[in-house]
Image: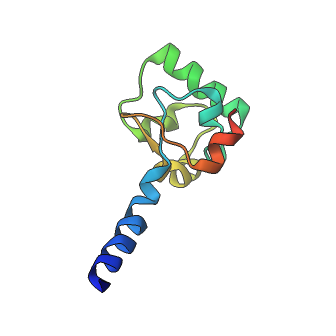
Amino acid sequence: MNKVFLLLVMFFAFTGPAYAVVNINTATQAELETLQGIGPAKAKAIIHHRKKKGSFKSPGNLEDVKGIGPATMKRLRKDITVGGTTTLKKESRSAIR
């Protein structure tokens, strides 16, 4: 019984951080705005950049967008991806409706 409980606790501890991920190649402006430090202007700049230059090849390419530098990337790296689907935290979903 204790082993099952410990296994469940470990499962939820390691799946929590992976729960909120924004695909910067497909995210809407509202989804991009859920990222820490990304407001309407930067979200629009990201969308404009990917429309003009194409998909981001890696999360680090986000630094090519004007206004996004190393400090912003350090903050965002764990929350962004260039593949898969965007998955938002429950509290973030209500913010985009």
Q: Position of residue 26 (x, y in %)?
A: 48, 26
Q: Which quadrant, please, contains the C terminus?
A: top right
Residue 9 falls in image quadrant: bottom left
Judging depth in this view, the residue of 82 and 2 nearest the camera is: 2
Question: Residue at the top extreme?
Answer: 52
Question: In the rendered view, does 69 fall on the left or right side of 33?
Answer: left
Q: Position of residue 32 (x, y in %)?
A: 60, 35
Question: In the rendered view, does 66 fall on the left or right side of 58?
Answer: right
Q: Which quadrant, please, contains the N terminus?
A: bottom left
Judging depth in this view, the residue of 11 and 20 nearest the camera is: 11
Residue under the point 65% across and 25% down: 44
Residue under the point 64% across and 45% down: 92
Q: Position of residue 41 (x, y in %)?
A: 71, 30
The relative height of residue 59 versus residue 3 in the rendered view (above or below) is above
Residue under the point 36% across and 34% down: 83
Tell me if I can see residue 34 in this picture.
no
Judging depth in this view, the residue of 88 and 32 nearest the camera is: 88
Question: In the rendered view, does 65 fall on the left or right side of 43?
Answer: left
Question: Residue at the front extreme?
Answer: 1
The relative height of residue 72 versus residue 62 in the rendered view (above or below) is below
